[in-house]
Image (cartoon, rainbow, N blue to C red):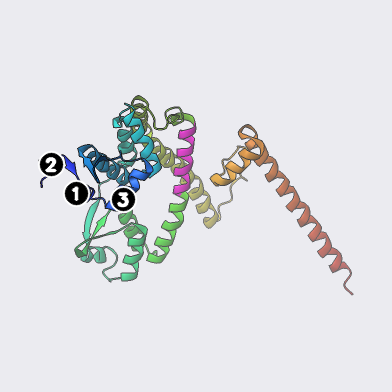
Amino acid sequence: MSEQSVAEYRIEDLAHHSGATVRTIRAYQDRGLLPKPERRGRANVYGSTHLARLRQIADLLDRGYTLASIKELLEAWDAGRGLGGVLGLVAEVQGPWTDEEAARITRADLDRKFGGKPDDAAVTEAVDLGVLERVPGHDDEFLVPSPQELTVAAELYAAGVPLLAISAHLRELRGQVEHIASRFLEFTTEHVFARYLGHRPPTDADAAEAASLVRRLRPLAQQTVDAELARAMRTFATRHLQEHLGVQGPPPVDSEPRSVTLPPETIRAVHRLVGQENAAAFIAAATEREVQARTLDALTSNNCDSRQFDQRP
């Protein structure tokens, strides 16, 4: 019984052609994701529409959608609103965010890159971090998602940095960069994308326009981080060198406002407490109060120590 010649399926046949299990198909029916089958006597009969819908659901699940979101999308589809724009937006967001291309490296080349001595523990750590990915069926070969990142690690190792220190630094750096990415997404969602995502799901036109904006804004985060990192490195490297060379310069004038990164949960808690418009003033006042309290504690402590010293025989 071929799929081309038969347009009607029992549930077992539908499961075979779609790749879903019978239990999954029935669960989709209960959730309203799949139209009810036609009842013929004591049998349920499914058609090509059911097969197409099951394949749609599988594709959306692969793209990271939840079943609740899929139900909304399919309801929009059934109401005449296409999925083309939404899927285009998904493809744009899930696409590569860098022009760098992945490469492959053999275990022998990897060992040579890091001093020529095999280190299984370091390789396992690199795989856990995603710096290397194992290639199924090829135990002596790895996929390198970011050759630049691997090259940086090799250069640091050649300069004398231990591999464990490199991996620990990468973990710390990754957490900080993920925080920056999260803040950038919150910022652009609030000020740019909120107007396109008001509909659930968004219309085709809104989704297509949002996808175009993603393409335009995609490089901005990296460009901003690059510029700020260059500024910070210049400032701190100069200060660091002066400290180690014993160069005495004029005392730094700290009159310009500085930005401080706070966890998103802290920002949201402050917004709930005093409102978004008062958040900056509240944080500044709270910080100033804490500084004053610690200054008073230090002065009190110093005075008590001095009195105790004076009372010694």
Question: Mark 1 highlights which residue?
Answer: 13
Q: Residue at x 30, y 29 (%)?
A: 82
Q: What count of labels does the image hold? A: 3
Question: Mark 3 highlights which residue?
Answer: 24
Task: Give residue 288's quadrant in the image.
Answer: top right
The mark that comes first in sequence, 1 or 2, is 2
Q: Residue at x 58, y 41 (%)?
A: 268
Task: Give residue 272's quadrant in the image.
Answer: top right
In the image, is residue 158 above or below residue 6? below
Question: Mark 2 highlights which residue?
Answer: 6
Task: Identify the magenta region.
Answer: 177-190
* Image spot of residue 83 (x, y percent): 30, 32
* Image spot of residue 223 (x, y percent): 39, 38
In the foreground, 26 or 275: 26
Q: Is residue 50 left or right of residue 208?
A: left
Q: Is residue 162 visible?
A: no
The main secondary structure of the magenta stretch is: helix
Q: Which mark is residue 110?
A: none
What distance separates the C-alpha of mark 3 from that of mark 1?
13 Å
Local SS, label 1? helix
